[in-house]
Image (spheres, rainbow, N blue to C red):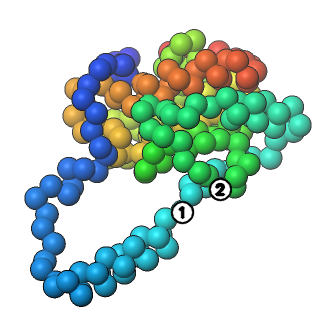
């Protein structure tokens, strides 16, 4: 699509998100006792700040909830080469993958800014809406939704997974959309096709 980086699936060497920040950084010498104390303190602080990602859906009628439950039950163990992780609540209508988590949520409201004239990028027959301009800044998290289907599904890809070079295809997002599109078609109801 003109003005948007393309989503393509290419075989590229894997990279660990955030790994570039650790290169060349040396910790100050603290001595054995202080090093152990610092390590425990860091673990406590990091443990207090982290926890399972929260997945929040809107209130759904019985049919919508059943569709989202079936969709969620069929979500894969890995998405875009990231392992599935625990979420809160345990019966959430969605899943999370990797750290930071890529999240998939079923039963979200229509995306802000979406209307009948909005354009979508089609992946395997499913139209995915990307709010205008949100995919242009690789330092922001990317939110995509399949607004033509009910209930609506949302995919969030943290900036850590997005290529910093706009000339490189976003393999993580493309891979995730490729994996999710068939499940959207299988479990959710097409109300209106969202096309480019």
Circle 1 sits on which residue?
A: 51
Q: Where residue 108 appears, x then y in whole percent?
A: 68, 41
Of callouts 2 and 1, which one flags the residue occurring earlier in the amino acid sequence?
1
Closest to the observer, 30 or 49? 30
Q: Is residue 32 positioned above or below 9 on the image?
A: below
Residue at image x 67%, y 29%? 74
- At x 48%, y 48%, the residue is 101
- On the image, the x and y values in percent for residue 107 come to 71, 39
Estimate the x, y position of residue 52 in percent, counting from the top left.
Answer: 56, 57
Q: Secondary structure at mark 2?
A: loop
Q: Residue furthest right?
A: 62
Q: Residue at x 73, y 23 (%)?
A: 187
Q: Residue at x 58, y 39 (%)?
A: 104
- Whole-Å distance between the Cαs marked 2 and 1? 9 Å
Q: Which residue is mark 2?
A: 88
Residue 151 appears in the figure: no
């Amino acid at each position: 699509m003109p003005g948007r980086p393309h989503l393509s699936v290419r075989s590229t060497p894997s990279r660990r998100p955030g790994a570039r920040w650790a290169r060349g950084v040396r910790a100050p010498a603290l001595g054995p006792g202080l090093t152990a104390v610092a390590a425990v303190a860091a673990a406590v602080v990091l443990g207090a700040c982290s926890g399972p990602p929260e997945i929040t859906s809107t209130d759904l009628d019985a049919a919508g909830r059943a569709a989202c439950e079936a969709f969620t039950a069929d979500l894969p163990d890995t998405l875009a080469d990231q392992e599935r992780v625990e979420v809160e609540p345990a019966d959430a209508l969605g899943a999370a993958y990797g750290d930071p988590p890529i999240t998939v949520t079923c039963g979200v409201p229509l995306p802000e800014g979406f209307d009948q004239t909005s354009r979508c990028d089609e992946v395997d027959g499913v139209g995915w809406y990307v709010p205008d301009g949100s995919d242009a800044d690789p330092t922001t998290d990317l939110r995509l939704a399949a607004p033509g289907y009910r209930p609506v599904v949302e995919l969030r890809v943290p900036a850590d997974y997005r290529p910093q070079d706009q000339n490189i295809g976003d393999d993580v997002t493309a891979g995730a959309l490729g994996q999710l599109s068939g499940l959207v078609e299988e479990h959710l109801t097409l109300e209106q096709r969202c096309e480019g």
